[in-house]
Image: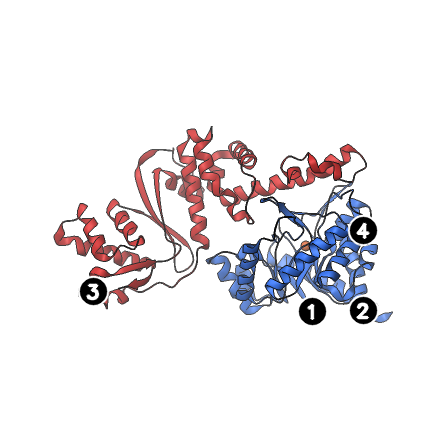
Chain colours: A blue, B red
Amino acid sequence: MQLPPIGFGLGLRTDHYQHILEHNPDVDWFEALSENYMVAGGKPKYYLHEVRKRYPIVLHGVSLSIGSTDPLNLSYIESLKALIDEVDPNWVSDHLCWTGVSGTNSHDLMPLPYTEEAIDHVAGRIIQVQDILQRPLLIENVSSYVSFTHSKIEEWEFYAEVVRRADCLMLLDINNIYVSARNHSFDPDDYLKGLDTERIQQIHLAGHTDNGDHVIDTHDNDVRDEVWRLYRTALRRFGMVSTMIERDDNIPPFDDLKAELDLAREHAAEALQKNLDE
Amino acid sequence: MAYVQRANESIVDDIDATSDEHRARRLSIYYNAYRIRLRGSIEVDHPALGVYLGDDGFETLAAAYIDTHPSDQTSLRHFCDHLPDFLRHNKPFSDFGVLSQLAEFERLLMDVFDAADSDAQPMDNLTSIPATQWPSIKLLFHPSVRLYVSSWNSVEIWRAIKANQKPPEALQSENQAWLVWRNFDRLTEFRSLAADEYAALSNALDGVAFAGICESQLEWSAETIVAQNVLDMLRMWFTAGIVISIDI
Ligand SMILES: [Fe+2]
């Protein structure tokens, strides 16, 4: 079920295309945002293919809207399938959320009510998408600022059960766990304990903005200490998991991100070493 | 969706919160994020329009456009598809005809940027065809090729802003045609077209054969030189790398 780990990766960003092709940096793989390459041709595709010649690629989407009550967007899924055929990614991911309803799109990752009914709905849709794509999906936990009174179970119970029932994999965003734990006052360790090790295929790390009474998932600065700590806890629990750092705003020079990725390697080595010692 | 568009209403009662104020504050995070994201998409896709409008003008436009056109597309790439029309039909923007044309030009540049790829044909492939077959020759063009017609100096304004220079005053003019395309290095190029070349290229893009193009060029060229003039145009198109196939 689980795919082999591929090490430490970074997001493929327009600002860094040239640098990557010129310097072949020591990064194990790149994560490309699917929607950016669902175009006919031109520079975006050219660079994607050039990077693909040199590195493994995973595709990460934001538009599947797997939790929506609208019908599945088949034309989107077909475009995704075409891109998969072109790029041959190691795996493909999207989010446990809904992005729009009744044809209107929020372009945001909105949380679901955590109910039995929603588990059935979302798992059924993931199964349909996996059937069309003929490959397992990775589903990522989102950060949230609100929760619903309908919710009967905890977020991690919901997430773990959706993934079990759909028989898919997890892209675990450690920063999102931290952000939601702060916003909804739960213990992030409980979250990690509620998940199945053998389903966790990839980890996201990112920076956030701490506003005191709430935390926002901004992806515009360095990974914070609290998130590094939770990352080490996660790896001690799950063993080595392919890890990447998401940076979507205020994007620094490539070497700065590379340095942060090397820091992730150090945190991982330390966490896994501790495992061996115990 | 109502709660991202208006930060209130139906769904609000279902949100778990310790107080109304707490609930409103949390919902406003989504509401603000929605507007910031769409505003960013306008700014990224229409940089020259943004500079031309100035900060206040741009914020007014962004707010009005977001209110009028909730995003109905999977991709933000198409969020501003209605922007030229919006500028044409809504005051105060409609009082300045150049705005809509500037937006139209920027959208056209986006189409050129990510249009499909295709290999260009060299001119030799044309000249090796026997002259007797020329009348029926049709050309196929690179998917990025676009014709743009302006009745304002929108391209000149775009060019000045792009070069960080003060844009010229907006002026209405005779219709001016432009050819826009993506070159061998995947860079966008454009040049103005005289009326005769615009007519010839419009014909050729519509699939009119060489003989038909020559015929419609009689409006500009004497019969004795029309074939040569059209051939000169074809040579420029081949040199620019916009011809991808020659059908006989
Ligand atoms: Fe993430």
Q: Alpha carbon of mark 2 to alpha carbon of mark 1: how far?
A: 18 Å
Looking at this view, is B24 or B1 the one in front? B1
Can you identify the residue that label 4 sits on? Answer: A154
Can you identify the residue that label 3 sits on? Answer: B133
Task: Give above or below for B191 relative to A42.
Answer: above
Element at label 4: loop
* Displayed quadrant of residue B195: top left
Can you identify the residue that label 1 sits on? Answer: A5
For marks 3 and 1, give the one nearer the viewer.
Answer: 3
Can you identify the residue that label 2 sits on? Answer: A273
Name the N-terminal-most of marks 2 and 1. Answer: 1
The dot on residue B24 is none
Quarter that holds the N terminus of chain B: top right
For marks 4 and 1, give the one nearer the viewer.
Answer: 4
Quarter that holds the C terminus of chain B: bottom left
Q: Position of residue A270 (x, y in %)?
A: 79, 65
